[in-house]
Image: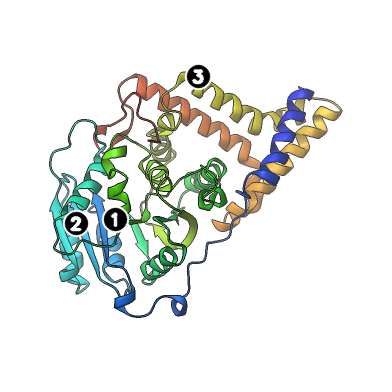
Amino acid sequence: MTALALLSLAIWLYLLALRGGFWRVAPDLLPAADERPQGAATLPSVLAIVPARNEAEVIAESLSSLLSQDYAGSLHVLLVDDHSDDGTAEAAQAAAQAAGRAERLTVIRSRPLPQGWTGKLFAMQEGLDWAAGRQAPPDFVLFADADIRFRKDILGRLAALAIRRRTVLTSLMVKLKTVSLAKILLVPAFVFFFKMLYPFAWVRNPDRRVAAAAGGTMLVHRETLMEAGGLGAIRGALIDDCALGALMKRRGPIWLGLTDEAFSIRAYPAFADIRRMVSRSAYAELRYSPLRLCVALLGLALVFLVPPIALVFAHGWGRLAGLAGWILMSAAFVPMLRFYRVPAIAAVLLPAIAALYAEFTINSAVEHSLGRGGAWKGRFQAQAGSGGKP
């Protein structure tokens, strides 16, 4: 136990010092209004593509924030209705009318889902096909989830960042909604683990291979995406945002940031809701490999569970190493808790939260083995051999 505790402590020292500062949390500041290019002629044209399947509950608020963007360039919003049966399209059109922006919105219905595609990616591709048929296709496409509410100036600031850094993909991880005990405990950890896997500083560094994106807000240079093979190149990916990030980084710089200027408005009130959300794609991240699953579970145990176990059961140096490891992991988690306005004392629960995520991952593998992998709104989309990266 002493050796394991010392190894876990060494890992935490490495993570804090050499893992791209993943634990640092400050909302990434987009260019301010006075730093943006001035005038419509200097701004790229943008088509916001919103894939939506049974989103009537949230689509009005989300679309209203997109349609009301303070953007001096050309902006049009395309809702791709992915065979909804709850009145999503009608709710979207009513929201556009209520906002006085009906001319900015087009609603199309997606064709039947072809074999080999995930539903969301095919809906996004339908939007790209629609754009390609326009007389003047847009310079950029903004892939936006149907449950995101944006500040009115965020598109202009995203576009300014893309122009300044010449990025082919510019993405924001929006602030997820925390309204229940389950979300207060699990959502900050979800973002913490994501940043540990994909340190944002490394994602932004063109000299590193690490690539990722956040699916809720992705501003993509359209021609570069087409040159990369379009979304057909990643058509089976469950973790579509990270797959798109990897595809685009091979073509140019990408940028990923954390923001509190765009918010998820979807409610996952129960523990089971979050379990389903994570289980949908956790095994895909491991490329459906039992070996990778075992390695991941052992890694979680070594990094997160060994320190508290050693503190209780080890002696001497082992106990001290366990205490130090638990202190370091808690300290690393505190900035994310503060971002979500959760009391810092909750950081001591990180080992227990990690154990829950380990169970979610095991459940993801079990669901896949039963033919229910990638479950999302009535579809089971996981395909053997199709991981989160192209």
- Distance between the alpha carbons at the discs numbered 2 and 3: 42 Å
Examine the rendered structure and indicate whether residue 336 appears above or below residue 378.
Answer: below
* Amino acid under disc 3: Leu
- Percent x, y for residue 213? 43, 49
Mark 2 or mark 3, earlier in chain: 2
Label 1 environment density (alpha carbons within 10 Å; few <14, some 14–19, many ≥20): many
Q: Which mark is residue 382?
A: none
Q: Residue at x 42, y 50 (%)?
A: 214
- Distance between the alpha carbons at the discs numbered 1 and 2: 9 Å
Q: Which mark is residue 131?
A: 2
Residue 215 visible to an observer of this rendering: yes
Label 2 with label 3: CB-CB less than 8 Å: no
* Amino acid under disc 1: Arg
Mark 1 or mark 2, earlier in chain: 2
- Percent x, y for residue 169? 39, 54
Q: Nearer the viewer, residue 142 or 85?
A: 142
- Percent x, y for residue 5? 75, 28
Mark 3 or mark 1, earlier in chain: 1
Circle 3 is placed at which residue position? 291
Label 3 environment density (alpha carbons within 10 Å; few <14, some 14–19, many ≥20): few
Q: Secondary structure at mark 2?
A: helix
Examine the rendered structure and indicate whether residue 368 appears above or below residue 21.
Answer: above
Q: Nearer the viewer, residue 67 or 347?
A: 67
Label 1 with label 2: CB-CB less than 8 Å: yes
Label 2 environment density (alpha carbons within 10 Å; few <14, some 14–19, many ≥20): some
* Amino acid under disc 2: Ala
Q: Residue at x 47, y 63 (%)?
A: 165
Circle 1 is placed at which residue position? 222
